[in-house]
């Protein structure tokens, strides 16, 4: 039987707005449970990335329930830090970018087109995925804390096309002109995650991408209950009522959950303070897929 991690105690009533700038980084570090060195180095960004994806789950429940997703700094801090919620790329990577900049990293955001689970010749998708590019000693590194169950668990060098092993999958970053294609080696096959544009976009492009992802009727976040979390030992992924656990030793466990089990998984595996108004979406998710 696979072991699931216990939940971290949280106060669902903590809805404080974003703290003053002087208190921002310490509050974030406490949120992810990081007590190590804080300096603009590769070792530090890697440690922060690993701690972040283990502590702050990927989720887009506010898009599913129709509550909407605000990607302003105050709203992100209140939700992901104060309320101990999770979020998706525009929240997660925007938060991580501000942390890195506050620490002193040379960092910027990038936008890309998600290609996950699509054939190479599929039509272009919208620019709806945000990542962070960090430059250390002139070398560019891709850092992503917001791509669900396939999120890279470590920084990826953007100036090398060689496979880059991590504690989970190996990754590869291949440049085609002004576009980077990022792929993961999953079950023996290179699968493209997304394609990134070279130039850092203006803020309005994030707003448009966030609107499409959270509100457009074609966005899968408007129709599916999705959550993910990656630790040093395992990846946990929930899609409607299907829970998948992938251990680093190669074992995979897939189970279909009832509504009560989904609610319990959200709290105990994905560490979320489950809200009563989520119940209708959870009950719909429980009937979305049938095992076998």
Image (cartoon, rainbow, N blue to C red):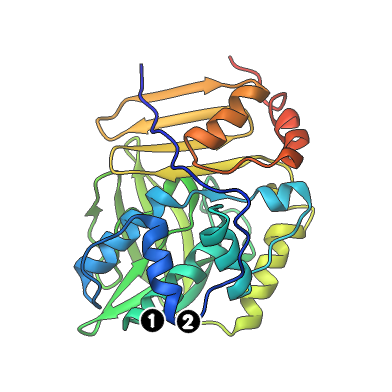
Residue 164 placement, left or right of 246: left
Instruction: Name the residue nearer the viewer: 217 or 63.
Output: 63
Which quadrant is the N terminus positioned in? Answer: top left
The picture places residue 95, in percent across and down from the top left corner, at: 49, 69
Residue under label 2: 21
- Tell me if mark 1 has few (under 14), some (14-19) or many (20+) residues whose alpha carbon lies within 10 angstroms of its own: some
- Tell me if mark 2 has few (under 14), some (14-19) or many (20+) residues whose alpha carbon lies within 10 angstroms of its own: few
Residue at horizontal 63 percent and vertical 78 percent from the top: 205
Residue 211 placement, left or right of 115: right
The picture places residue 276, in percent across and down from the top left corner, at: 73, 38
Q: Quadrant of residue 134?
A: bottom left
Residue at horizontal 57 percent and vertical 72 percent from the top: 18
The picture places residue 167, in percent across and down from the top left corner, at: 24, 46
Secondary structure, mark 1, is: helix
Which quadrant is the C terminus positioned in? Answer: top right
Residue 163 placement, left or right of 191: left
Residue under label 1: 102
Query: Which circle, 2 or 1, is nearer the viewer?
Result: 2
Q: Are marks 2 and 1 in contact (CB under 8 Å)?
A: yes
């Amino acid at each position: 039987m696979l072991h699931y991690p216990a939940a971290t105690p949280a106060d669902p009533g903590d809805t404080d707005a974003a703290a003053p700038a002087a208190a921002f980084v310490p509050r974030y570090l406490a949120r992810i449970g990081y007590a190590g060195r804080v300096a603009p180095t590769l070792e530090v960004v890697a440690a922060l990335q690993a701690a972040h994806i283990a502590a702050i789950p990927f989720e887009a429940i506010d898009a599913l329930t129709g509550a909407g997703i605000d990607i302003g700094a105050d709203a992100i801090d209140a939700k992901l830090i104060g309320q101990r919620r999770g979020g998706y790329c525009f929240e997660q990577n925007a938060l991580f970018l501000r942390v890195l900049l506050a620490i002193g990293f040379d960092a910027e955001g990038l936008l890309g087109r998600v290609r996950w689970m699509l054939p190479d010749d599929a039509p272009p998708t919208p620019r709806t995925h945000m990542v962070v590019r960090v430059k250390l000693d002139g070398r560019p590194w891709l850092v992503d804390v917001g791509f669900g169950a396939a999120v890279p668990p470590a920084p990826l060098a953007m100036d090398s096309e060689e496979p880059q092993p991590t504690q989970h999958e190996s990754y590869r970053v291949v440049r085609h002109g002004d576009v980077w294609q990022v792929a993961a080696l999953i079950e023996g096959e290179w699968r493209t995650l997304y394609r990134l544009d070279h130039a850092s976009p203006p803020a309005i492009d994030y707003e448009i991408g966030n609107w499409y992802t959270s509100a457009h009727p074609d966005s899968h976040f408007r129709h599916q209950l999705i959550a993910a979390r990656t630790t040093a030992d395992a990846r946990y992924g929930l899609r409607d009522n299907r829970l998948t656990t992938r251990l680093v030793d190669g074992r995979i466990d897939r189970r279909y959950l009832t509504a009560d089990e989904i609610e319990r998984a959200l709290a105990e595996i994905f560490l979320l303070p489950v809200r009563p108004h989520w119940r209708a979406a959870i009950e719909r998710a429980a009937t979305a897929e049938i095992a076998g």
